[in-house]
Image (cartoon, helix red, strand yellow):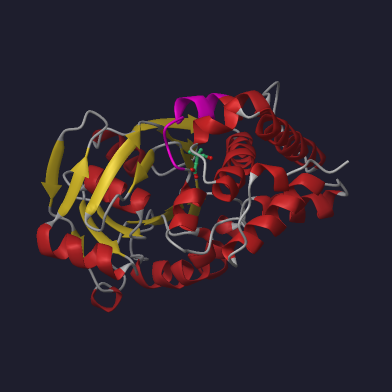
Amino acid sequence: MIKVAILGSGALASFFAARLHEQAEVHLFGHWREQLAAIREKGLRLIETTGEEQFIPIQVSQLSRYPDYFDLVLVLVKSGQTQLAAMEAHLLLNRQNPNSCILTLQNGLGNKETLEELNPGRVYVGSTTEAARVPEPGTVEHTGKGTVHLPEGMEREVVSVLSRAGIEVSLHSNLDAILWTKLAINSAINPLTALLGMKNGQLLREPLCLAWMEGLTREVERVAKASGIELGDRNLFDEAKAIATRTAGNHSSMLQDMESGRVTEIEAICGAVVRYGQRAGVPVPLNTHMLEWVKQAEGGRHFSLKDLNLPE
Ligand code: KPL
């Protein structure tokens, strides 16, 4: 049985642990004490999209007990914790197995590079549209069925274990297009929902929010093209609206972070657009505003629609 370490203890980490536990020897390594204590005590309560529930025994483990042990390290920590995850993955990965690898499915850009500094040649980056939330410690609710997008060269055993676990996997020759599309969707949905306390679908009913979503995605499109990313005929604004429609009732991950008082992933999302924009010489005023405002909101400032006038 393939040995899988999952780094993270939030919604997606818990969801993937629950899905994989029958197909792999799964260990969860995280830092969210209440969540880990609840899982240790009673198992993880999984609520499916159908409302069905079950308790799943998940092994919550300590890093020092499993050096050089795992064939796959799945990284699902918030992007601000990737540096720490790189060290943890370095410790846990079984380097005797030439096929052992690290897979990040985190939001934003830049995580692969951070993980690779300590683990060169072992890191794959993918993307997922699975959606989940933790309504209370010890419980994970699957709020939207999605896909795991992986590069074509991904280790076969990893593709196979995900598929056997009932997760839809899609392989891509041009994963960059997927990653930049997800970046555009995240930049269009996450900061607005986090600032305004809105569910994803509410954005579509506010003309001002739609104008922001259009402007934010157009900036990502321009930066991607200037950075040599082949987006084909994808319209990133349409993709963002489609995801907001499909996940209308959900709180975005950034709104969930804001509600729980956690640092958000704004640096890996709008921050990444700003950094790539500077490198490519493309101005991105809207992503720059969102980056600044979400940081202010993390510091306690409250926003409403009237604070979000579009810059000239
Ligand atoms: O990935 C997301 C998130 O909440 O982080 C979606 C659902 C796509 C919204 O941007």
Is residue 172 visible in the rendered structure shown here? Answer: no
The residue lying toward the viewer, choosing from 296 and 286, is 296
Point out the stretch of residues depicted in magenta: 242-251
Residue 190 is left or right of residue 279, and the answer is left
In the rendered image, residue 299 lying in the magenta stretch gets the answer no
Is residue 53 visible in the rendered structure shown here? Answer: yes
Q: Position of residue 180 (x, y in %)?
A: 64, 39
The residue lying toward the viewer, choosing from 188 and 179, is 188
Residue at x 58%, y 33% (from the top left corner): 203
Residue 271 appears in which quarter of the rendering?
A: bottom right
The image shows residue 75, relative to residue 224, as above or below, that is below
Residue 153 is left or right of residue 295, and the answer is left
Residue farthest to the top, as pictured? 233
Residue at x 15%, y 64% (from the top left corner): 40
Q: Position of residue 27 (x, y in %)?
A: 24, 60
In the rendered image, residue 243 lying in the magenta stretch gets the answer yes
The residue lying toward the viewer, choosing from 214 and 211, is 211
The image shows residue 184, relative to residue 289, as above or below, that is above
The image shows residue 116, relative to residue 105, as above or below, that is below
Residue farthest to the bottom, as pictured? 64
Residue at x 70%, y 35% (from the top left corner): 217
